[in-house]
Image (cartoon, rainbow, N blue to C red):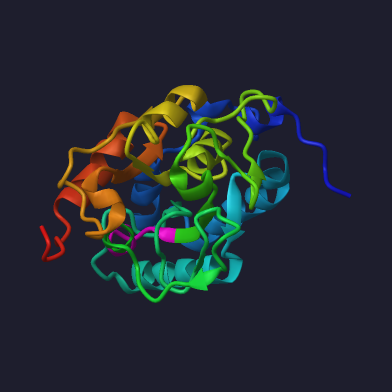
């Protein structure tokens, strides 16, 4: 039987309130200092995703085994004293409009079979190289074309502040996940408000980076949309923007 989850449970999983949840930069510092393991973090977030996501529908794909393996590898690097990237061992989810190596991608469309991707999109690769551990894919509307996160393929995603409301779109899955404490940070993209609108609906920080600042595929909306993140702090958003801004650019730039 699926546990009944109330909106209050989503906002306040540990009795501390969202203001007490650690940011991605805080978690990265703790992992690097050996205060907490990436595997411990990932297991905690996966357990919460498994409990809460049936009520929210923020994830369309959860990569349990891959996330655990990546977190274990991250902990091994810390133990060996190897140089660490800025977000080493921190969990993140990727919006299901963007290719992730080895993951299925359907862009929320019934017209597309799940195709296993053979590469990371440039911005996704930058996040991986920054040390993030990918835990799953978050929902969007079909091809990201409307400002609510609903599709015939995946159904409706709910706002953790009120389960009768939408988290907006098209990055509503990532917004709902971060606002409900399923993750400290979520990948997103924005052409006409698809980061900014969900941020405003869910009480998060969301910024559309300038065109050309974030590496992207040449075909992705002809440069109209750019990729970014949804976070709970301005510092997290700024730190990831630094990652994107210094990442290698595809030759079409």
Let me know if residue 131 is in the magenta part.
yes
The residue segment tinted magenta is 127-133
Q: Position of residue 64 (x, y in %)?
A: 60, 65
Residue at left offset 55%, top offset 30%: 167
Q: Residue 82: name its quadrant.
A: bottom left
Vertical comparison of 54 with 167: above or below: below
Q: Position of residue 208 (x, y in %)?
A: 28, 35
Q: Is residue 136 left or right of 154 when viewed as pictured?
A: left
Q: Position of residue 186 (x, y in %)?
A: 43, 45
Quarter of the picture containing the C terminus is: bottom left
Q: Most extreme residue toward the right, as rendered?
A: 1
The reply to whether residue 12 is visible in this rendering is: no
Q: Is residue 39 left or right of 230 when viewed as pictured?
A: right
Residue at left offset 35%, top offset 67%: 120
In terms of depth relative to the viewer, which is nearer, 88 or 36?
88
Residue at left offset 72%, top offset 47%: 51
């Amino acid at each position: 039987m699926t546990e009944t989850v109330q909106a209050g449970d989503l906002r306040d999983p540990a009795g501390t309130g969202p203001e007490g949840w650690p940011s991605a930069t805080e978690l990265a510092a703790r992992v690097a200092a050996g205060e907490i393991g990436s595997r411990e973090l990932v297991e905690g977030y996966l357990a919460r995703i498994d409990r809460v996501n049936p009520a929210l529908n923020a994830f369309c794909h959860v990569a349990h085994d891959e996330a655990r393996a990546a977190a274990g590898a991250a902990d091994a690097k810390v133990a060996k004293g190897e140089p660490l990237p800025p977000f080493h061992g921190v969990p993140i989810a990727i919006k299901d409009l963007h290719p992730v190596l080895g993951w299925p991608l359907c862009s929320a469309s019934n017209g597309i079979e799940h195709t296993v991707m053979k590469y990371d999109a440039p911005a996704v690769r930058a996040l991986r190289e920054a040390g993030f551990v990918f835990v799953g894919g978050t929902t969007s509307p079909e091809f990201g074309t409307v400002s609510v996160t609903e599709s015939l393929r995946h159904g409706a995603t709910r706002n953790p502040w009120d389960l009768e409301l939408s988290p907006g779109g098209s990055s509503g899955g990532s917004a709902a996940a971060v606002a409900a404490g399923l993750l400290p940070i979520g990948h997103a993209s924005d052409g006409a408000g698809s980061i900014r609108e969900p941020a405003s609906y869910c009480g998060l920080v969301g910024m559309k980076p300038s065109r050309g600042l974030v590496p992207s595929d040449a075909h992705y909306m002809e440069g109209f949309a750019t990729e970014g993140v949804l976070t709970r702090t301005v510092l997290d958003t700024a730190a990831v923007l630094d990652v994107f801004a210094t990442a290698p650019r595809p030759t079409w730039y």
